[in-house]
Image (tube, rainbow, N blue to C red):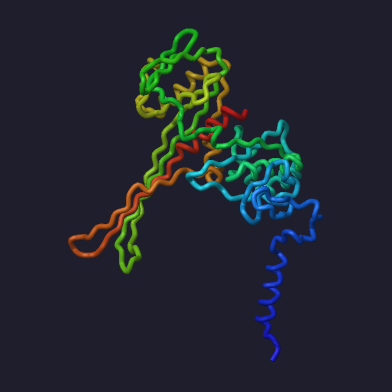
Amino acid sequence: MGPTSDETDQKESDGSTIRDLTLTETDPRFDPSEMIDCEKCSRANPPDRTACLYCGQPFASSLIRSDIAKVNYKQPESWESGYSLIFSGKVAPTDESIAAAADLLKIDEEMLQKLLAVKASVPLIYLRSLTDANVLASQLSQKGFDCAIAGDDLLQAATPPTRVRSIIFERDEVLLQDFNTERFPPVAINDPVLIVTGSLIKTSSEVKGKITKRVMKNAEESLAVSDETVIDLYPPNDFYGFRIRASGFDFSCLGERKQQIASANMAVLIDELRARFANAVFVDAFKTAGPLIGEIWPPDEIRQSSSVTRSTLGGVHKQKLTVLDNSVQFTKFSRLQRHIR
């Protein structure tokens, strides 16, 4: 009895899988002189790799063929540092280079168009390895799409700007009171400061329900969102900058223009800063950029509590509270404007 149709299909599938496997020492696609010898284990690797296939040792940048190297697109875990690619071309890219870049970046072409339309520097992709970031940047450059690389070690988003408690407007300078030390560092009004506006958003999701056979039933979900206007101000040569938050700030500096609502006061304060700092650069694109970069730089997800209780009438009930917080995301965006303009 001959093989069945299913068995034939399976053999063809297995053969296709084998053909797709990466070959090494005997790979006919490459000349033996092109193979890369690993410094750690001495095994030969195809020149389209950035690290040893056998022991994982990264190759020196001088050995990597960036034109054919395969990029590992894996994003960093939440506790790891990563590297972001940001478009740095001086002129708008052509439709052909955008299409090629979208293919290399593994994102939808329409999404790439939206990211490029933001009037600020934004991440296009977030990678785990600096080697992969360099290779991808080189490949993009060959397509006429130049990118800069910003590492998390450069942005230092874990350290937010110095929080400001109040402001004193003088004739030639602005005094920013440190929220913690209460000192008043001065900033000259003629300095080319960078001012970035945005929002700190926290979304709290609470789920409650009865557990039956280890499955939550009749679940009820409640959602709460807080949206706080924030202003980051970077004087020249100040890496970390200053941050004005709507909460906890003394708006007495606005005088008669002071409003009853904090959000309204922040709008007035932004206008006042525009008037005072004649040479300032303002970036107010985070409202547009935030939703677009959510998958590239996702907000932090914090599981604040999870509890199981027994009701007096019997039954087991479970409650979970999860919070999405974009504080680090906004700080990274803010610092990115500080470094890449």
Residue 151, placed above or below residue 213: above
Front-lying residue, 269 or 51: 51
20 vs 164, left or right, is right
Residue 103 is at least partly visible in this image: no
Residue at x 45% of width, y 43% of height: 300
User: Where is residue 207 shown, x and y percent of the image?
Assistant: 35, 54
Residue that protrudes farthest toward the top in the picture: 171
Query: Quadrant of the image for the C terminus?
Result: top right
Residue at x-position 41% and y-position 14%: 168
In the rendered view, tell whether residue 33 sits above or below residue 121. below
Which quarter of the rendered picture does the N terminus lie within? bottom right
Residue located farthest toward the left when viewing the structure as drawn = 312
Q: Going by the picture, which residue comes out furthest to the bottom? A: 1
Q: Residue at x 52, y 36 (%)?
A: 287
**Where is residue 124 drawn, in percent x and y?**
62, 42
Q: Is residue 263 above or below residue 6?
A: above
Looking at this view, is 337 or 46 the one in front?
Answer: 46
Asked if one can make out residue 128 in the rendered structure from this viewpoint, the answer is yes
Query: Which residue sits at x=79%, y=61%?
Result: 28
Percent across and percent down for residue 202 are: 41, 41
**Front residue of 99 and 266:** 99
In the image: residue 101, left or right of residue 277: right
Q: How many marks?
A: 0
Could you say where residue 285 lies in the image, as x and y percent from the top left? 55, 33
76 in relation to 285, above or below: below
